[in-house]
Image (cartoon, grey):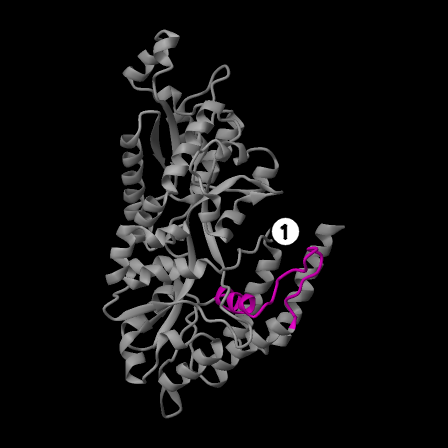
Amino acid sequence: MLKRKKTAAASLALAASMLLAACGASSGNETNAGASNASPSESAASSAPASSAAQEPVTIEFWYGLGGKLGENMKTLIDKFNASQQEVIVKPVVQADYSETEQKLQAAIAAGSVPAAVLSSNVDWARKGYYAPLDDLLASLPDFDKDDVIPTFLEQGQVDGKQYFLPMYGTTQVMYYRKDAFEKHGIKAEELTTWEKLAEAAATMTVKEGGKTTFYGWEPMWGAGNMIDAVLSKGGSILSEDGKTVLIDSPEWVETWELFRKWIHDDQIMRIHSGGQGWEYWYKTIDDVMKGQAAGYTGSSGDQGDLDFNIVAAMEQPGWEGAGAGKPVAEAIMAGIPAKASPEQQQAAIKWFDFFMSAENTAFWSMNTGYIAVRQSALDDPAFVEFSETNPQIKVPLLQATHASKPFQDPTGGKISDALKIAADKVQIGNTPAAEALKEAKETAQRELDRLNK
């Protein structure tokens, strides 16, 4: 996801020192990380008689690593929540990015002084008891409709059958295309429902001069991600159901990756931009489309803020002939409640999450950021409906997410994902036959998985 990976994480030592400076040391049974920063009125309330103090709102800290427009929109919703009721006050505590939030939370857990809510998730930490399970808290909410939450997003927050995290928003890779290129060749986006049809359209739109392509029919994004999406849409899997066998050399994988190799190297109807510093390859891909050097590309739903929709439009990723609709990965950005937060703080935090996830507010977030609303009912929100009439691209990621795949959780700590990354470079850049590249990747990945399962 483009926008949330641009800043580097601070070091753990710096994070810990900043945390202690901001929050102060806890004492006794205190679990509210913001207690040492209480305003004079809040401090006075804490020393008031019990009958008076019971009427005071619960103040909680919400930690999140969002800057720029994302940060501004988060602050808007926090202010809206605080003004909407008198039971809970959310105090925003902003970090540089998601990684820094996790680093500071690690230090806070070690110190025993945690915030009540964080825009962060960690499956391993949930299993270790660092996060609170949310099932009972959700049951206490009278109007929380689990069935309305996009299933793949909700499932990503489940650990060993319990709900530990809630999706705040999501992202997925969609297709952006030049409207003039499609119109010139009489191509209709709604008819490109399979990769076979997309490849035909790409070949039709490709322009070659002297044997060299000067205008590409499509540009996948560098890396394994787009090709994995296509494999999942064909019914392929990374691991067997029992989690003991790596399946990345199956026909679904080999056939799909070999087609991408063919389209890029043999047919030269597609191109990959690779290398460079940071996100250079990503912006080069976008620039090719925006500057009229390619008909379209596959990119993040979060790219929408960088695109001119007078020139481009969006569509869902295709499936394959005989395999149904596409099933690309849709990833949720999730929030959780640290287990060391007091019961009162946890109850306050779940109310804030419930508010953020409402159809109205998740629709607001989507319209203002390009990320995916987490509720299916957001499609019916009046403001979203009105916005989508003039900005139809906003609906595409949400519609795609309703039939998307969950992101892969690598049990080897990234070794399988690394093997796939190397294989993708061999296919996309080195023109290595997919069967060869995936066979080597399978051997490496299976060895790492076997070592884990011993």
Q: Is residue 36 above or below residue 197?
A: above
In the image, is residue 64 part of the stretch drawn in magenta? no
Q: Where residue 325 appears, x then y in whole percent?
A: 49, 68
User: Which residue ends up furthest to the right in the rendered image?
Assistant: 454
Please report the bounds of the magenta region as a residue range.
223-250
Q: Is residue 213 above or below residue 348?
A: below
Q: Quadrant of the N terminus?
A: bottom left
In the foreground, 378 or 108: 378
Task: Give the side of residue 220 with respect to residue 122, left or right.
Answer: left
Q: Where residue 373 appears, x then y in whole percent?
A: 38, 51
Task: Give the side of residue 349 with respect to residue 125, left or right.
Answer: left
Query: Can the viewer see residue 33?
Result: yes
Task: Give the side of residue 12 with respect to residue 182, left or right.
Answer: right
**Amino acid type indicated by mark 1:** Pro
In the foreground, 17 or 437: 437
To which quarter of the image does residue 236 belong? Answer: bottom right
The residue shown at (28%, 48%) is 69
The residue shown at (26%, 51%) is 383
The residue shown at (57%, 38%) is 126
In the image, is residue 249 part of the stretch drawn in magenta? yes
Q: Where residue 79 appears, x then y in whole percent?
A: 27, 34
Q: Where residue 444 appears, x then y in whole percent?
A: 67, 63
User: Which residue ends up furthest to the top in the rendered image?
Assistant: 49
To which quarter of the image does residue 276 belong? Answer: bottom left
On the image, numbered disc 1 is attached to which residue?
Answer: 411
The chief SS type of the magenta part is: loop
